[in-house]
Image (cartoon, grey):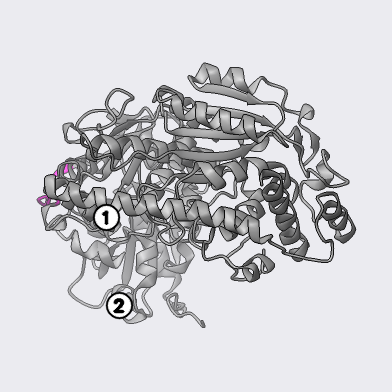
Amino acid sequence: MDELCINNIRVLAADTVQGANSGHPGAPMGCAPMAHVLFGETMNFDPSDDAWPNRDRFVLSNGHACALQYTMLHLCGYSLSVDDLKNFRQLDSKTPGHPECHMTSGVEVSTGPLGQGISNAVGMAMARAHMAARFNRPGFPIFDHQVFAICGDGCLQEGVAAEACSLAGHLKLGSLTVLYDDNEIQIDGSTDLAFTEDVLKRFESYGWHTITVTRGDVDTGALRKALAEARGVTDKPTLIKIRTTIGYGSSKQGTHAVHGAALGDDDIAGVKKKFGMDPSKRYFVDPRVKAHYEAAAKAGAAKRAQWARTVEAYGQKYPAEAKELARRLAGKLPENLIDSLPAFKAGDKNATRSYSGKVLEVLAKSMPEILCGSADLSPSNKTNNPGWGGDFQASSPNGRYLRFGVREHAMAAICNGLHAYGGILPACATFLTFTGYALGGMRVSALSGHQVFYVMTHDSIGVGEDGPTHQPIEHLATLRATPNMLVMRPCDGNETSGAYAVALSKRHSPTTFALSRQKVVTLAGSSAAKVAKGGYVIDDCEQRPQLVIVGTGTEVGLCVEAKKALSGVHVRVVSMPCIEIFAEQPLAYQRTVFPSGVPVLSVEAGSTFGWGRYAHAQVGIDTFGKSAPGGDVLRHFGFTPSNVALKAQKLLKFYESRAVPELLERPF
């Protein structure tokens, strides 16, 4: 049965790639034995309920091998038909070129970029440890599943994987098992070209348990033994190094030629003959193979049903915990949460990072599903507070404060895994400039619809003495250009509360909070509620405005001061805490903020890129910063009331004899 199933997996995956004449057949053919043992007898899953909270999690980190995952999902009875396999890599299919969690039932996370998946799996294992500590009770193992991942050489060459796996070893995540497809081939050829380290020694130094399977192409007994050993190690994650042959059975096996291109009809025919299968049959599934995996799915369904009975009994004995668990898994906010967020008085003065800290204090007490952490910048990010109940550590997985260490990229990728797990809302923090390191994971957050809070402080040249490397310039523009990413740059305390309120309501979008180190004054016209519009009039004039000055963050107060210097001019000041939300508003509302025929000047201590949509001229920075005290740097780049007023006067002068272009209208 092992041989029959494994060979059927190999040819079905190869047929899937061949049908599209695009994809990666080699890794699926080499990984077929480990997939067979995992799906056929090791993992607990139920295709009729792909969100069962206690299912074993499976992550294909080398996502280019997705023909393998789609094959297994089809064989096990997920909603993936033969026609879906035939539609591999086609427009709007359930079988895209890399696994996408928002498109395919049974796919836990999107794993296109290498290293993301294994890092997501670390996040899932952290979530499992936390949820077990929070909800399990004697006799009620509500969360006792395992997390499995398959990865390749490419994943282990990526720095993000090194960051995440180092943290996993520190946290002793015993529920995590990674199967390393050691086929010694990558796109350029042999891994000897660039990757000759001793992987097991590296992972041992991380604190992982390691196992070697030398004949992964055929020795299913060794695979079973290794997985059983891994399950028995509960105080360390496990890496199983499995030597395989890429494209096993193909005439090109063991070479990079089988990595990223369809085999060709003749080669596939040869593979089928070698495995005793009919070369004329495409997408063939032996009934015995189908029955084998359906039996595994049926066993999983029985375990899910037993789990449901356990949860029912749990609810009778622990009703408060059961109610809280149900709320969290449903993604519902606690009652009256938004009303409990802090409000600030006009004239209050603090940095927006500190206002954010005040909001997080409330959320820590009111939302037990939030796990928050920082990349070794807790005092600067203002993210830690007693409400988290202490650190999440191996000895205290019920703690809710995450010590990511200096691992920005892994931090973002781990948060994606935490959110994908269910019942957890992750928040993480560093300086805004270091989104350059985290951007890979942040982009996948947006693509996948993960609700992750990115608390990014030190948001401008106001950082000062640390200089250009620490002063974000292009970062706001980059993040705003990312689809489905909300970028919130609040101007004061009330807008900070409003920004969190909006982010809490966006269940399928990540939010980046760009927060200042320097202090700002809470403005009389600021409004938490109006943040939900993205932009609004914060300081108006009595008559129709002759000029609009729009700013974000710390520059909004500067715009108000500049208005005072423009005596005799009717000036409206607009705060734009979130451009993305403002862009979603009806044109009629947008015109109440930016009237037709009125020049607009934008003021933001960052790149001017993108502001041409809303402003006729910009005060910004299109170079890197300077190292000097923050106030000196701001003055050097013209962020003073007098300079903004001067630019405003030049703009008005320019349009004295010219028609003011309409900026809001779009042809489609």
Question: Does residue 647 appear to the left or right of 325 in the view shown?
Answer: right
Residue 589: mark: 2
Q: Secondary structure of the magenta portion, mostly?
A: loop
Which image quadrant is residue 649 in?
bottom left
Dot 2 or dot 1: first in sequence order is 1
Residue 395, numbered circle? none
In the foreground, 328 or 604? 328
> Horizontally, is 499 left or right of 514 in the view?
left
Residue 655 falls in image quadrant: bottom left
Closer to the eye: label 2 or 1: 1
Magenta segment includes 346: yes
Along the line of sight, the residue nearer the viewer: 409 or 597 = 409
Residue 354 forms part of the magenta stretch: no
Q: Is label 1 in a helix, a strand or a loop?
A: helix
How many marks can you see?
2
Point out residue 420 in the picture as x, y percentages from the top left corner.
Answer: 41, 50
Q: Which residues are magenta?
A: 341-349
**In the image: residue 661, left or right of residue 282:** left
Q: Which mark is residue 499?
A: 1
Please, what is the three-letter code of the amino acid marked with disc 2? Tyr
Q: Is residue 127 above or below residue 497?
A: above
Asked if the residue at tag 1 contacts the one at tag 2, i.e. Cβ–Cβ closer than 8 Å, the answer is no
Label 2 packing within 10 angstroms: few (<14), some (14-19), many (20+): some
Identify the residue shown where x is 45% and y is 62%. Answer: 611
x and y, in percent, of residue 357 in the image: 22, 39
Which of the two residues, 407 or 482, is positioned nearer the viewer here?
407
